Image (cartoon, grey):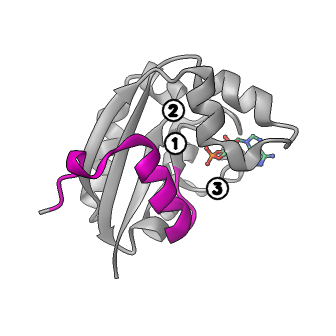
Amino acid sequence: AIQRTLSIIKPDAVGKNVIGKIYSRFESNGLKIIAAKMFHLSRAEAEGFYAVHKGRPFFNDLVEFMISGPVMVQVLEGEEAIAKNRELMGATDPKKADPGTIRADFAQSIDANAVHGSDAPETAAVEIAYFFPSHEIYSR
Ligand code: CMP
């Protein structure tokens, strides 16, 4: 089925100037960018986005990292977009990511792991709405 998913290019990858290289992987694998915006998140915005991880031991480091520089946020649309994007990203820990995945090629560590992608249809809907009102999403 055609799905939408939220993708974030994190501060490490924005700083390395590889937004275009990552976009190219989305586009050449059947994912269409139907909304996009650059943000420098406030602490409150980052904490709100990652609220499900509040209380986890990595929460503070995650938030610090996500506010350390600008991020590029996009909605991707395509056939099985959620799983497809996760496949392109590779494992959360870049050391465990398959060769040729975004994280294997561009990421350094589990925090500075280049990209985020929604993990399920329910979280995709919540995460998309967190950044984009429906009139800022351009589908067909
Ligand atoms: P992301 O997909 O953005 O979702 C939560 C982020 O927390 C994850 O990518 C990692 O960058 C970061 N993180 C740090 N440590 C862990 C961990 N032990 N398990 C999962 N995520 C972690």
At mark 3, the secondary structure is: loop
Where, quadrant-wise, is the N terminus in this rendering? bottom left
Horizontal side, residue 56 vs residue 15: left or right: right
Amino acid at pointer 1: Val
Question: Label 3 neighbourhood size at 10 Å, few (<14), some (14-19), many (20+)?
Answer: some
Q: Quadrant of residue 36?
A: top left
Horizontal side, residue 73 vs residue 67: left or right: left
User: Would you say the magenta stretch is mainly helix, strand or loop?
Assistant: helix
Give the label, 3 or 2, closer to the camera. 2
User: Residues at badges 1 and 3 in contact (C-beta under 8 Å)?
Assistant: no
> Within 8 Å: ligand 1 and the Cβ of disc 1?
yes
Q: Residue at x 48, y 60 (%)?
A: 124
Horizontal side, residue 38 vs residue 12: left or right: left
Which residue is the site of mark 2?
10
Q: Quadrant of residue 140?
A: bottom left
| Magenta-tinted stretch | 117-139
Which dot marks residue 115?
A: 1
User: Residues at badges 2 and 1 in contact (C-beta under 8 Å)?
Assistant: yes
